[in-house]
Image (cartoon, coloured by chain):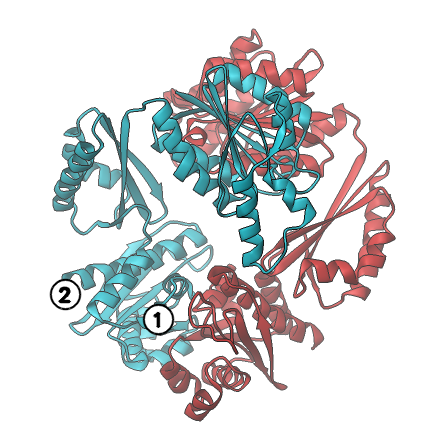
Chain colours: A red, B cyan
């Protein structure tokens, strides 16, 4: 089955917003086994909407539209679709009840312009949108399915995931698809591929593996196709158990979980408190940890010791160590971790000292050279990393490497 | 003049990458006065590329293509364009010299597959791409212009900005356009609009104003259209001088500069050193400051005092103040700033204490309530802010508000 995505909105064509709806929709549809053949971005323009529908119907079986369903005058998708399908706008009570409910939650009465949101073309199946006032609309026309959804990302996402894709799977009697994403950190894509080659080669032809690398993280996506969903799930579970034995330390979680979330769960589970001492990452490691709601339960704080003076004063780093070994050294990063653990009064302190760049590199310690230490009840350990030349990516990779060091230690206790 | 953007790449249609090229191109073209009427994303597929070109030519005068120009087999755009324009691939010496130069910089010889990059269709004008091996290609066909560029963002960006747009402006004898973006912070969009209403109403009809809001920042974009570029520039300069008098503290810079860059410039200029004390922002303020290369010249470090114990121990906050007023209070945030200034040994210390959410709010201090203080040579000052309910946005807005407080103070000395 072939699908086309049509995103409607003037803001796309002047480049005011990045079309993240398109990639999200394409990813969800692909994962559900629906092949996207074109993504079309057009303005809130009646003629162009109709023309795009004509052309999309020549290419695709299913057309998924987002945008242009707001209550204001510039949003014309609903009116245009009604005309296109020779349809009358009729009052849809469940949609009106939903609009009322949304306004009641904000202590507002439904305004006149928002009452219009409850009008839907009589030739569509309205799809209830509990997150907003604009309903989704499912049309069928000469064997083609055309679905219109709001452009607000979380409204569109809930509709597509919970209603549209299941309805498509039912209508087209699609084969079952099971996706599972394995989150890994610590190894680069090619090294990882080498290590899991035998496992990858053993995959049956109905289970595909995709490598999806990001700085510091490689996601492995398994997609299984077949008749029996439960059977596929079981097979994937078995494959993952086998993979865990091959690369036990590298897998940190599943299905888009972040390393900072995993750390939070581990610290809570083990009833431990963490702290940080950051030089080159300048607060980014602490920011990741505290971006998780409720992190105050397991994170006490940190020292950002950008200047050597702060390393000495706040983290008890010895001046002699700085002079003898330099700030980016095993000695200094270990002293930072030990000092942070003591001065912050935490169970585990992560410390990072490196050269983020673009300046500050030397032949001996080029940009990207980074020492990371972890001090805990069992003592301190440290490791050197050689990241790249890009400041932003070096900062991110260093913070992830520190979180990973803590993760491995916490998992072992 | 109407333009269509065609982005080619399988990765777009499975949602593996967000199509940031499309929004960047659309924004640049709009700013240059070229109206984008459609953005089309398609796979590396010969039939579809040709079909999309046929349809785009019906709609647009100019078609700008990105992607599919790599040296590997899956990239077929060049071959397809050569066929489409009944063109032969011929060897292009300047492109080959460029490929050689790029490989020499990496200490590699040009591989056989990369030699192919120097072949271009004989009916195009090749556009030299100094950032990569794939040249741009400018075709003209029945009065339409079709330009193919690589998909690598910075290669495409340099080609579009430095070669393609100037060539289009010349060919179509387009009117002059001058854009200037005014960066503001501290006021919301509607309050700002109210305050500058008279100024906005006084704009001549050939100078348009757009409000582009982001959390904590509102960009004002002026676009002037006319015959004489120098005259338009002068007019915009005069308008900006007038605006500066109306909202002197709100404008922090121009043309997409960040607040952290401005702070860096100001601290260097005034020869002052800054530090931080962060509670609810958990390191994000320090991260912003240290994301700027060379920030070690003016940033010494910070204390992330997520727990009250750290506020007391590292920042000399009085236990009595915490008990009496709570952590989110004027007293505590001022003590944090004073303590950070002293203990970090800096000229200026920013301190933030607030309720980022989603939990921790009370009736008296709901989620979003945030105190920010600045301690400097002239003493300490503080201010309360009421942000919203979204944790991530609250963290960002608090950090920007702290930077802005420092900016206003530094500007005045």
User: Which of the pair A100/A213 is nearer the observer?
Assistant: A213
Q: Is residue A71 left or right of residue B65?
A: left
Residue found at x 35% / y 71%: B277
Q: Quadrant of residue B211?
A: top left
Where does the image place residue B106, in percent across and percent down from the top left? Answer: 57, 59
> If you read the primary sequence from the N terminus, does the residue marked by circle 1 or circle 2 appear first?
1
Which chain is indicated by disc 2? B
Where does the image place residue B45, in percent across and percent down from the top left? Answer: 68, 29
Characterize the local packing of mark 2: few (<14), some (14-19) or many (20 or more) Cα atoms within 10 angstroms: few
Q: Quadrant of the N terminus of chain B?
A: top left
Q: Quadrant of residue A268?
A: bottom right
Which chain is indicated by disc 1? B
Q: Quadrant of the C terminus of chain B?
A: bottom left
Q: Label for residue B413?
A: 2
Q: Quick one: which residue is furthest to the bottom in this view?
A: A320
Q: Is residue B42 visible?
A: yes
Q: Nearer the viewer, mark 1 or mark 2?
A: 2
Rendered view: A390 above or below A21: below
Q: Secondary structure at mark 2?
A: loop
Location of mark 1 (residue):
B277
Rendered view: B127 above or below A408: above
Rendered view: B178 above or below B286: above
Rendered view: B358 above or below A105: below
């Amino acid at each position: 089955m072939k699908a086309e995505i049509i995103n409607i909105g003037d803001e796309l064509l002047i480049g005011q917003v990045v079309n993240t709806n398109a990639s999200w929709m394409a990813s969800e549809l692909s994962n559900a086994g629906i092949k996207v053949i074109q993504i079309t971005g057009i303005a809130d323009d009646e003629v162009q909407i109709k023309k795009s529908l004509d052309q999309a119907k020549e290419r695709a079986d299913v057309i998924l539209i987002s945008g242009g369903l707001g209550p204001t005058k510039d949003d014309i998708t609903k009116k245009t679709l009604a005309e296109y399908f020779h349809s009358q706008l009729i009052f849809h009570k469940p949609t009106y009840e939903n609009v009322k409910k949304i306004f009641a939650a904000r202590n507002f009465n439904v305004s006149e312009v928002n009452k219009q949101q409850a009008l839907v073309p009589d030739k569509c199946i309205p799809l209830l949108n509990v997150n907003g006032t604009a309903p989704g609309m499912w049309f069928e026309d000469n064997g083609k399915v055309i679905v219109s959804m709001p452009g607000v990302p979380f409204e569109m996402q809930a509709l597509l995931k919970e209603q549209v894709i299941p309805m498509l799977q039912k209508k087209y009697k699609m084969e079952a698809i099971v996706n599972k994403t394995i989150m890994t950190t610590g190894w680069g894509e090619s090294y990882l591929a080498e290590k899991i080659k035998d496992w990858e080669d053993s995959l049956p032809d109905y289970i595909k593996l995709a490598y999806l690398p990001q700085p510091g993280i490689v996601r492995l996506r398994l997609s299984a196709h077949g008749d029996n969903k439960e059977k596929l799930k079981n097979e994937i579970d078995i494959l993952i158990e086998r993979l865990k034995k091959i690369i036990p330390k590298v897998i940190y979680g599943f299905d888009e979980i972040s390393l900072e979330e995993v750390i939070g769960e581990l610290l809570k589970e083990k009833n431990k408190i963490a702290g940080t001492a950051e030089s080159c990452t300048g607060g980014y490691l602490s920011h990741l940890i505290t971006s998780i709601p409720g992190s105050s339960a397991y994170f006490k704080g940190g020292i950002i010791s950008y200047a050597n003076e702060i390393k000495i004063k706040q983290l008890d780093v010895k001046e002699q160590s700085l002079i003898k070994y330099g700030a980016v050294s095993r000695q200094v990063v270990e002293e930072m971790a030990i000092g942070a653990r003591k001065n912050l009064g935490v169970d585990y302190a992560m410390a990072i000292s490196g050269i983020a760049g673009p300046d500050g590199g030397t032949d001996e310690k080029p940009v990207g050279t980074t020492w990371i230490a972890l001090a805990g009840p069992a003592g301190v350990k440290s490791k050197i990393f050689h990241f790249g030349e890009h400041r932003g990516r070096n900062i991110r990779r260093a913070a992830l490497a520190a979180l990973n060091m803590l993760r491995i230690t916490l998992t072992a206790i």
